[in-house]
Amino acid sequence: MSRSRGAKRPTPAPASSRVAAAWDLATPSRTLAVGVSIGLVALVAAIDQGVARHPFVALDDDVYLLGNPHVARGLTWEGVRWAFTHAWAANWHPLTWVVHMLDVQWFGLSPASAGAHHLVSVAFHAANAVMLFLALARLTGRQSLSAWVAAWFAVHPLRIESLAWASELKDVLSGCGFMLALLAYERYVRRPSAARMLVVLAAQIAGLLSKPMLVTLPLVL
């Protein structure tokens, strides 16, 4: 039986709805997103766990950590005030100093504690890989490709310097600010508001307090 000429064809969903669905992380597969995130953490742990056996490096570590009396005392109010009001070794990155102080508070600063300091950087790197995956998945709607890009970032040889060198904590810490700003900016673009832009600014400020290199972030966004 032929279809009636008067029958209406199904109306395709508006383009804006299709774009919104593609950007919605839950639409492709929330389960996949969780699985990929766990996989990225496991990948970083498997590849970089060896840094736990690395000592402090006789380059910057002696100035930044071992020879820095403010960091060596661990986390104190006086140390936090110093971090925000003074430069050390030609660097002003107070949030990085505060995290170094926390590391010393928890693990100490003996040669045997070097591995623990490195593993803190590994944890931040794993978080950065997960946030990169989530940001790319939300921006593109292509979870599988985003997972491959994040995995490549997670295991790239250039990353190992930041993980096996305690003084380079500032690199992975500022990376957290970058990734958080990227995630927050994606949310702002989808639904602009002053509150969401403030979150973007807060993430960038946190990154700048970790390493001034993030001054370039607005150009990326």
Image (spheres, rainbow, N blue to C red):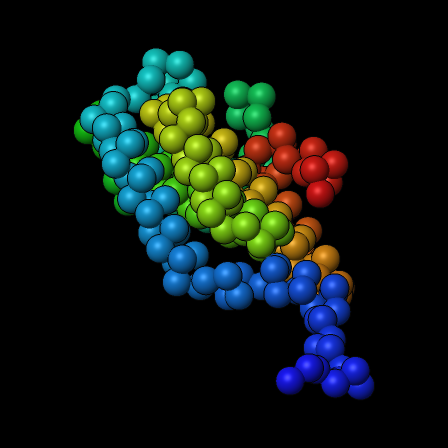
Q: Residue at x 57, y 33 (%)?
A: 211
User: Between residues 211 and 66, which one lies in front from this camera angle?
Assistant: 211
Picture coordinates of residue 154, whole percent (x, y) = 41, 35
Q: Is residue 148 visible?
A: yes
Relative to residue 35, is residue 154 depicted above or below? above
Position of residue 221 in the picture relative to residue 24 (left or right): right
- Quadrant holding the C terminus: top right
Residue lying furthest top: 58
Q: Viewer-proximal residue, 157 or 13?
A: 13
**Residue 41 appears left or right of 148:** left
Q: Residue at x 46, y 33 (%)?
A: 153
- Quadrant where the image shows the N terminus: bottom right
Quarter where residue 46 is shown? top left
25 up-or-down from 104: above or below: below
Residue 87: quarter of image = top right
Work out whether residue 13 or residue 167 is closer to the camera in this orientation and state it.
Answer: 13
The vertical placement of 133 against 174, above or below, is below
Most extreme residue toward the front is: 1
Residue 78 lies, in percent from the top left, at: 47, 44
- Taking the spot 53% from the left edge, 25% from the top edge, the residue there is 88
Position in image of residue 10 (x %, y %): 70, 77
Q: Is residue 79 visible?
A: no
